[in-house]
Amino acid sequence: MIRSTLSTIVLMAAASLSVPGQTTATPTMPTVADLVAQRVARLTKLLTLTSAQQTDATMLFTTELTALATIDTARQTAYTALQTAIKANDTAGIATEATQLGSLTTQAVTATATADAAFYATLTSAQQTIYNELKSSGLDGPGGPGGPGGPGGPHH
């Protein structure tokens, strides 16, 4: 009896996994536009941005994230080449890829700092005060707490 009940439960569970028409959606990564829109919406709420400031922020952060996406692709390529050089004990290759990774890091920091500086320049002094408080508390990242750039999340 127990074996029969167990078999029935297993069959019902298996059947529920293969119901026609039921698919498991693959999560998709947010686009640059999605990320920028979320960031601008959050900053608008926190800083009461004007529509002109929102337009500027959208342009600045889109430029930043587009550059960072390109840099990230190049970083992945350089990191793979570095791993290959390590496995081959290729000291010249290691030096080349380390230099490339350093250059890409400089480009990423520059892209982020340039966007931050230009955005900061669009703020009123009252908004700058609030923004400075947000930065000092770590709540200024593009993803907020736990998101990219926020406390507990990866930083770019």
Image (tube, helix red, strand yellow):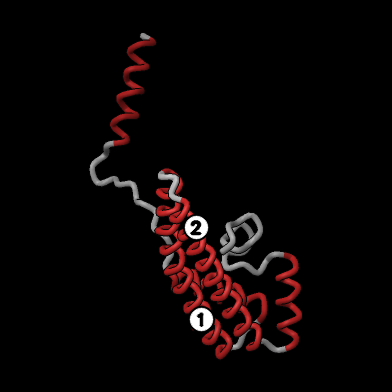
Question: Please, what secondary structure does the residue beneath circle 2 have?
Answer: helix
Q: Quadrant of the C terminus?
A: bottom right
Residue shown at the point (44%, 45%) measured from the top left: 89
Q: Position of residue 39 (x, y in %)?
A: 56, 72
User: Which of the two marks, 1 or 2, is nearer to us in this view?
Assistant: 2
Q: Position of residue 152 (x, y in %)?
A: 64, 54
Q: Is residue 82 left or right of residue 106?
A: left
- Please state which amino acid type lies under the numbered disc 2: Ala
Label 2: which residue? 95
Q: Is residue 41 visible?
A: no
Label 1: which residue? 58
Which label belongs to residue 129? Answer: none
Residue 15's place in the image compared with 115, above or below, is above
Residue shown at the point (29%, 45%) measured from the top left: 22
Q: Residues within 10 Å of mark 1 (few under 14, many from 20)?
A: many
**Image-quadrant location for residue 2:** top left
